[in-house]
Amino acid sequence: MSPAQRLFAESGLASSHVPIDVELVGSLLENDYHLTGRLQPVPTEKDDTFRLRTESTAYLVKVSPPDEAHAVVGLQTAAMRFLEANAPELPVQRVKLTVDGRDNVVIVTDDGRPRVLRVFNFVEGAVWAQTSPDGEQLAKVGEMLGRIDVALEAFAHPADRRGLVWDIRHFHQLTELVEHTPNAEHRQLAEEVFRLFEATIVPRLKDLETQVIHGDYSPYNVVVDQQSDNYVTGVIDFGDTMRSAVIFDPAVALANLLGRTPDQPWRDAFAFVAGYERARPIKDLELPLLPVAAMARLTLRALITNWRAERVPERRDYLLAHAKDDWTNVGRAMDVPLADVLAQLRNPVTS
């Protein structure tokens, strides 16, 4: 098994599965949570996810894929509960317990592979991806991630060293994904990013500060309110939580900001970093690696999207919608000299 195949398997992304029976989910919610209402499917990368509308409120219901380890699901839940207990001021999505105090229900499916059902409060509002934040609002989004990273510094879990294909520290092991990219220009872009990553980040990997991180602080996992002074009103989806280099957490967010303003492809990223450093200053050793890590993450999403869209056709539309502009944005970001990007990162502005 190649490194890429191993990481896909450990990440629960190597195969498709039969969707969970909605009637079974409803029965478990009634028996274990005393919740009844309408279940509405919500598109996601790999879980079976539903919005549950009861008479008085709404919840998010997730059923893990059959090839995701129970311990990994436990890591995700434990991180959320740790933040609730130790940093209750942070607007992190809350885990709802069963009537007898458990944070999940294990489902044994017909093929014998257990799946885990969990219930969370539903965070109302628009996600960051649905808005057009200005520089100061982007800074507030960055600041919130910095606060989360500071709070998670003391958290540990037996499964936090999980292998995850989305973890940027494994990027250099995934060169075989280029073969699944049909466009020659895209393959060339990917190869350039791999060379840059190999030259700048791989030699420093062992020197980077590590801890448990959110892992997927993206525009679809941050709920915002344009009228609120805080702007960020919710942080959701801890499905990619893991122990990795801390610098890779803001890199995920930056990957989603690159190229959105064609004439200034790094502008939004600079504003985000300015806010992040209000809560957690980035070390001089790590700052030069941040833009490379961001481009690596954006390239990784484009590569994985092509690979998975072929193998999981039932999630093809969801996958392609989240990555439709990735190659264009990688090219725009690469067109700016790295020295210029670093100079601006050292003197960020939010306007």
Image (spheres, rainbow, N blue to C red):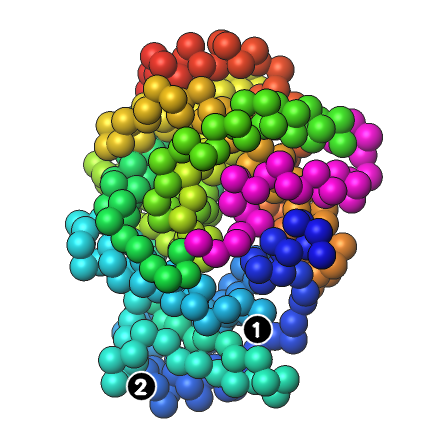
Which quadrant holds the C terminus? top left
Query: Residue 250, percent across and down?
Result: 40, 35
Residue for point 35% across, 45% down: 211
Query: Residue 20, percent across and down?
Result: 57, 78
For residue 238: magenta? no
Judge left or right: residue 88 versus residue 332. left
Q: Can residue 100 be seen by looking at this rendering? A: yes
Q: Which residue is mark 1?
A: 66
Q: Residue 268 falls in which quadrant of the image?
A: top left
Which secondary structure lies at badge 2? loop
Of 5 and 121, nearer the camera is: 5
The three-letter amino acid code for the residue at tag 2 is His
Which secondary structure lies at badge 1? loop
Q: Residue 101 falls in which quadrant of the image?
A: bottom left
Query: Residue 331, percent across and down?
Result: 65, 23
Q: Which residue is mark 2?
A: 34
Residue for point 30% across, 59% down: 80
Of 241 and 33, nearer the camera is: 241
Query: Residue 234, percent across and down?
Result: 31, 50
Q: Residue 209 falls in which quadrant of the image?
A: top left
The residue segment tinted magenta is: 161-186
Q: Can residue 219 be seen by looking at this rendering? A: no
In the depicted structure, whether residue 345 falls above or below residue 239: above
Q: Few, some or many C-alpha atoms within 10 Å of disc 1 (few <14, some 14-19, many ≥20)? A: many
Which quadrant holds the N terminus? bottom right
In the depicted structure, whether residue 212 falls above or below residue 339: below
